[in-house]
Image (spheres, rainbow, N blue to C red):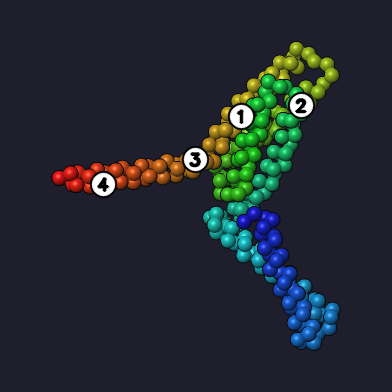
């Protein structure tokens, strides 16, 4: 359940209960209008808070994380989101058409890694090299490239620096693709296992049919 649906579910649970408590306090128990409103609001807030607590516990249990682990991952993902925003802004600002495809692929892979680790936080541990090394390097290089390329007068040394930066970003693209592969490595292994099981099942069915056919011929 994403954050918006979780919020909506808690709200749709808390509001009706809040109204029910207010009506019961006012009409059934003869409380004052203001006091009934306080009771209703308190019941709604308590329900909303309890719903959030239950959802968080279920989320942590589902992903096999402790509260401390999730807070650590979430803190790093929040920081990474800001870095990725900076990176994409810088990438879009680079005016070098030959590398456009490479830059688009780089941004696509970074978004994919972030979305996977956000939806399944435990994958963060397979992507630590991306978050703690490659992402920082990419942001620094891209922003530095934009700054240098915006200078009004170009020199041979500056052109060489820009070329070297483009080559380094190209190399980083391959490293980030490897980061993505590490994040989904378990899924690939699981897929291969399922393929092997399916192949074995198919072979057994074929062998059974061949055996049945040979028996009918006899």
Q: Is residue 125 left or right of residue 194?
A: right
Q: Is residue 135 left or right of residue 153?
A: left
| Residue beneath disc 3 | 185
Query: Of 181 and 126, which appears nearest the observer?
Result: 181
Nearer to us: label 4 or label 3 = 4
Whole-angstrom CA distance, mark 3 to mark 1, is 18 Å
| Residue beneath disc 2 | 146
Give the mark nearer the N terminus: 2 vs 3: 2
> Residue 188 appears at what percent x and percent y?
47, 40
Give the mark nearer the N terminus: 3 vs 1: 1
Q: Is residue 192 above or below residue 1?
A: above
Mark drawn on residue 61: none
Q: Secondary structure at mark 3?
A: helix
Residue placed at 76% from the left, 26% from the top? 146
Give the mark nearer the N terminus: 4 vs 1: 1
Residue placed at 59% from the left, 33% from the top? 176
Q: Residues within 10 Å of mark 4 (few under 14, many from 20)?
A: few
Mark drawn on residue 173: 1
| Residue beneath disc 4 | 208
Quarter that holds the C terminus: top left
Nearer to us: label 4 or label 1 = 4
> Residue 59 appears at what percent x and percent y?
59, 58
């Amino acid at each position: 359940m994403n954050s918006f649906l979780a919020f909506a579910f808690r709200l749709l649970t808390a509001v009706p209960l809040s109204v029910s408590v207010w009506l019961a306090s006012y009409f059934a128990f003869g409380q004052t209008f203001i006091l009934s409103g306080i009771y209703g609001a308190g019941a709604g807030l308590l329900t909303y808070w309890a719903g959030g607590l239950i959802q968080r516990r279920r989320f942590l249990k589902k992903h096999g994380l402790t509260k401390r682990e999730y807070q650590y991952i979430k803190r790093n993902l929040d920081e990474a989101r800001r870095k990725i925003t900076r990176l994409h802004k810088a990438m879009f600002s680079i005016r070098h058409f030959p590398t456009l495809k490479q830059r688009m692929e780089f941004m696509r892979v970074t978004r994919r890694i972030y979305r996977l680790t956000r939806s399944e936080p435990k994958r963060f541990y397979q992507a630590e090299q991306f978050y703690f090394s490659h992402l920082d390097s990419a942001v620094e290089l891209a922003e530095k490239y934009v700054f240098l390329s915006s200078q009004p007068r170009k020199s041979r040394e500056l052109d060489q620096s820009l070329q070297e930066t483009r080559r380094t970003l190209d190399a980083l693209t391959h490293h980030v693709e490897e980061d993505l592969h590490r994040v989904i490595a378990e899924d690939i292994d699981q897929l291969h296992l399922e393929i092997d099981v399916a192949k074995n099942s198919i072979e057994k069915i074929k062998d059974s049919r061949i055996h049945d056919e040979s028996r009918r011929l006899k």
